[in-house]
Amino acid sequence: MIANTPKPPYYAVIFSTIRTDVDRGYTEVLKKIKALAKLQEGFLGMEAARNGVGITVSYWKSLETILRWKHNTEHSLAQEKGKELWYKKYQLRICKVERAYEFEK
């Protein structure tokens, strides 16, 4: 599903991953973290896809709301599990969205 975001400006956090073969608890934690992110002040939406490389883009109102999410206790615990078990590699990028447009049939 494509996120329904407001008019810019806002911010996008792009989380690109390559997984390990370990799946222990991943699906449950992922569901929990996605649900928790949606409850955070400043969260605007999320999109994700995986085909070898996983890419999750979350949208946020401000850099401050991104920072609060980064330091959320449950999110921090999931990050540590990811480093320990689930990811061979990841990259995180934070971008300011200055212009956006769409098409739909």
Image: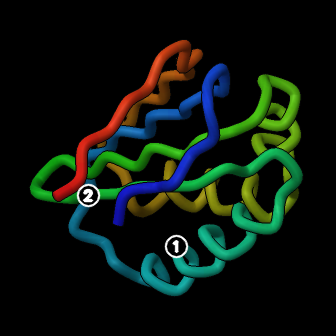
Distance, label 1 to label 2, CA atoms, is 13 Å
Measuring 81% from the left and 67% from the top, which residue is drawn there?
Answer: 39
Q: Residues within 10 Å of mark 1 (few under 14, many from 20)?
A: few
Q: In the rendered image, which quarter is residue 6 located in?
A: top right
Residue 16 x %, y % = 34, 39
Residue 19 x %, y % = 27, 56
For residue 95, side relative to residue 86 (left or right): right
Towards the viewer: 90 or 57: 57
Determine which residue is flagged by label 2: 49
Towards the viewer: 84 or 100: 100
Dot 2 amino acid type: Ala
For residue 100, side relative to residue 22 (left or right): right
Measuring 56% from the left and 22% from the top, which residue is drawn there?
Answer: 94
Q: Report the quarter where the N terminus lies.
A: bottom left
Towards the viewer: 103 or 63: 103
Q: Secondary structure at mark 1?
A: helix
Dot 1 amino acid type: Leu
Q: In the rendered image, which quarter is residue 105 located in?
A: bottom left
Residue 30 tag number: 1
Upstream in the sequence, badge 1 or badge 2?
A: 1
Measuring 32% from the left and 44% from the top, which residue is drawn there?
Answer: 17
